[in-house]
Image (cartoon, helix red, strand yellow):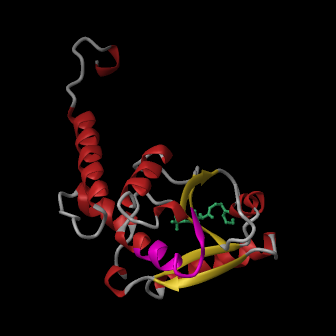
């Protein structure tokens, strides 16, 4: 339950999977806000690698040894971000900005959110320099091609990526059953 004496923000995203860039932003966000709700969008237009539950678990485990973890709430939502924010009674959205390439997309999204609900504001923090070129898509692409992404994502994410890729590749190479009509 939300405590009205505390400052909250919602940090929404796909987090498929969480990267060290996200971690850096959450840690720095905790210097500004008492509580951060990390909200995973159950985005129907994207085909995620990890389920929402898998993503939630990776986020929780990534902060397991952080003494401030009690100030991080991991959640998920369907539908519009502004509806979720209103439902939670939180009026600040936190987003990270990396290179200039992020700006146009963030600008559009912020504009649309503001059009939908003028009581909700988005604040931006620059992603830490060393994570400027890290995003979840690049991580997945690299990992799928066999690259080691250690140091760019939390260790738990590295492990889960290896497991996931193994299971994806295992499915692809499974021999077809003999006598299957569809194969003839
Ligand atoms: O990590 P991402 O994929 O850049 O995060 C984008 C996210 C999840 C924040 C954005 O797609 C979102 O808010 N989705 C929920 C639907 C919504 O409210 N869209 C904005 C107005 S159309």
- Residue 65 appears in which quarter of the rendering? bottom left
Q: Is residue 30 magenta?
A: yes
Please indicate, yes or no, whether residue 114 appears anywhere in the rendered image. yes
- Residue 164 appears in which quarter of the rendering? top left
Q: Is residue 107 magenta?
A: no
The residue depicted at 43 percent of the width and 70 percent of the height is: 22
The residue depicted at 17 percent of the width and 57 percent of the height is: 146
Q: Is residue 42 left or right of residue 59?
A: right
Segment tinted magenta in the rendering: 24-37
Q: Nearer the viewer, residue 30 or 94?
A: 30
Please indicate, yes or no, whether residue 13 appears anywhere in the rendered image. no
Q: Nearer the viewer, residue 131 or 115?
A: 131
Q: How many labels, in total?
A: 0
- Residue 107 lies, in percent from the top left, at 63, 82
The residue depicted at 48 percent of the width and 72 percent of the height is: 26
Q: Is residue 79 left or right of residue 97?
A: right
- Residue 169 appears in which quarter of the rendering? top left
* The residue positioned farthest toward the top in the image shown: 179
The residue depicted at 52 percent of the width and 81 percent of the height is: 31
Q: Is residue 74 left or right of residue 86?
A: left
- Residue 58 lies, in percent from the top left, at 39, 53
- Residue 100 lies, in percent from the top left, at 47, 88
């Amino acid at each position: 339950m939300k405590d009205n004496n505390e400052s909250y923000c919602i940090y929404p995203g796909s987090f498929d999977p969480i990267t060290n860039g996200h971690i850096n932003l959450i840690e720095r966000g905790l210097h500004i806000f008492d509580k951060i709700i990390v909200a995973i969008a159950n985005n129907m237009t994207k085909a995620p690698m990890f389920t929402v539950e898998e993503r939630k678990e990776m986020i929780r485990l990534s902060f397991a040894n952080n003494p401030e973890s009690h100030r991080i709430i991991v959640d998920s939502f369907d539908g519009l971000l502004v509806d979720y924010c209103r439902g939670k009674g939180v009026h600040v959205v936190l987003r990270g900005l990396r290179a200039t390439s992020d700006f146009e997309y963030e600008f559009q999204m912020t504009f649309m959110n503001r059009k939908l609900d003028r009581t909700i504001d988005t604040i931006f923090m620059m992603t830490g320099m060393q994570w400027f070129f890290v995003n979840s898509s690049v991580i997945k692409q690299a990992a799928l091609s066999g690259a080691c992404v250690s140091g760019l994502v939390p260790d738990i994410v590295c492990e889960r990526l290896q497991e996931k890729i193994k299971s994806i590749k295992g499915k692809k190479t499974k021999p077809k059953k003999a006598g299957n009509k569809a194969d003839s």
